[in-house]
Image (cartoon, grey):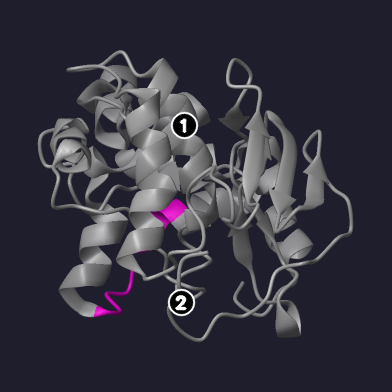
Amino acid sequence: MAFLEPAEKRARFQDPAWRQRFLDEEPIALGGDFARFVTTTWERMFPFQGDSSYEPGYEDSVAGIAEATGRRPEEVAYDHLARDGGTGMLYFPLFNYAYGDLELTRQLQLHPQTRMGLSDGGAHCGAVCDGGMPTFMLSYWARDRTQGSGTMPLEHVVHRQTRQTAEMYGLLDRGLLAPGMRADVNVIDHATLGVHAPEIVHDLPSGARRLLQRAHGYRHTICAGEVTVTDDRFTGELPGRLLRGPRSSA
């Protein structure tokens, strides 16, 4: 399987005989304890359904579904991955989900000594898609969340992702709507803002894979005064530049 093209792999996944062979074989324990943890901890593994799937309960897990339907967890996981032509995904929160919800994350987000910032910069781009985080923060955390203590104020989420982050990294010429500052602006339709389900694309050098998560609800994105996005579509303008250090204020 490892040497097949992605389309061939997905086709093989749909073959009932291959499915049975796959489920009947004993897995080879490669990668040690961590590999076993992320491939067999069924109660921490969730069939991903979209934007609302980031805070599931035990009943939504592979283990919970297996119990409810009388199937093996391996079958539940396989059948979900095989859905929609082999494009199904499993959600596995590694950190901050020990209690089965995101309340701890909410406390961290509200604490004055924490900052936004996770991005693997490509190191794990086939397993996570951090680029969707800013949109998720504005839609789920500032509008949609109903579990636990609910949402956070929109102003707080915006501030954390703009001026607060800019100040932390010494980018003092941006992050505020004020005279003399760099004109980086998002014009957002907050009522419709959201992220799409992640998708796997093979557009890296050598055809390597990455997870891509598109967003909707951005009327305009303006970078240094130039419009780069209109109605969720790129305009072709590329005014961004590499920064090699802090920037003074205006």
Three-letter amino acid code at the position of disc 2 = Ala
Q: Quadrant of the N terminus?
A: bottom right
Q: Foreground residue, 72 or 102?
A: 102
Task: Describe the element under mark 2 as helix, strand or loop.
Answer: loop
Q: Is residue 17 left or right of residue 162?
A: right
Identified at 73% across, 85% down, the residue is 206
Q: Which residue is mark 2?
A: 123
Q: Which residue is mark 1?
A: 138
Indicate which disc, 1 or 2, sits on the residue closer to the N terminus: 2
Figure quadrant of residue 60:
top left
**Is residue 221 left or right of 60 when viewed as pictured?**
right
The residue at 42%/65% (across/down) is 119
Q: Tag 1: residue type?
A: Leu
Q: Residue at x 40, y 50 (%)?
A: 163
Residue 26 among magenta residues: yes
Q: Nearer the viewer, residue 19 or 209?
A: 209
Percent of width and height locating residue 118: 35, 61
